[in-house]
Image (tube, rainbow, N blue to C red):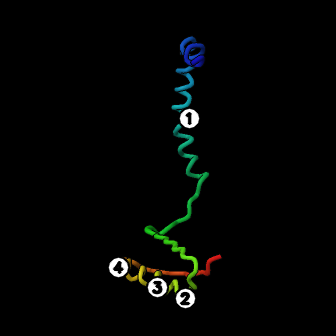
Amino acid sequence: MWIVKGFSLSRTLYIVVLALVLLLIKPVILLLHGRWISFPNINIPVISVIWTYSGLAPAEMGTRIVSIFERVISDDHLNNIGAQSNPSR
């Protein structure tokens, strides 16, 4: 509350100048921000499904759950479907 009463209301010119400076710096920051972060190219859409079922061997997991799931989601618009079954730890 002291910020509003003690600083903002008594020194409104400082607040106006600060707001103008932030408004002027914003385009520069937005232009430079794209250079700082570079994301990898991803061919969207990508779907990852993780099935955890302890007690099943990887081959049994592939035949009982994964292959049935792949048949259900298969479509003419899908380019690639892949599966990997690993033993549980």
Q: Tell us which disc is closer to us: 2 or 1.
A: 2
Residue designated by label 4: 75
Q: CA distance from mark 4 to mark 1?
A: 49 Å
Quarter of the image where the C terminus is located: bottom right
Residue 52 percent across, percent down from the top left: 54, 74
Q: CA distance from mark 2 to mark 1?
A: 59 Å
Q: Amino acid at mark 3?
A: Arg
- Of marks 4 and 3, which one's residue comes earlier in the chain? 3
Quote the CA–CA distance across marks 2 and 3: 9 Å
- Which residue is at a point 35% across and 79% down the rendered structure image? 75
Q: Name the residue tied to disc 2.
A: 59
Q: Which residue is mark 1?
A: 25
Q: Secondary structure at mark 1?
A: helix
Is residue 55 toward the left or the right of residue 64 in the image? Answer: right
Mark 1 against mark 3, which lies toward the viewer?
Answer: 3
Q: Give the CA separation, mark 2 to mark 4.
A: 24 Å
For label 3, the residue is 64
Label 4 to label 3: alpha-carbon separation: 20 Å
Q: Are marks 4 and 3 in contact (CB under 8 Å)?
A: no
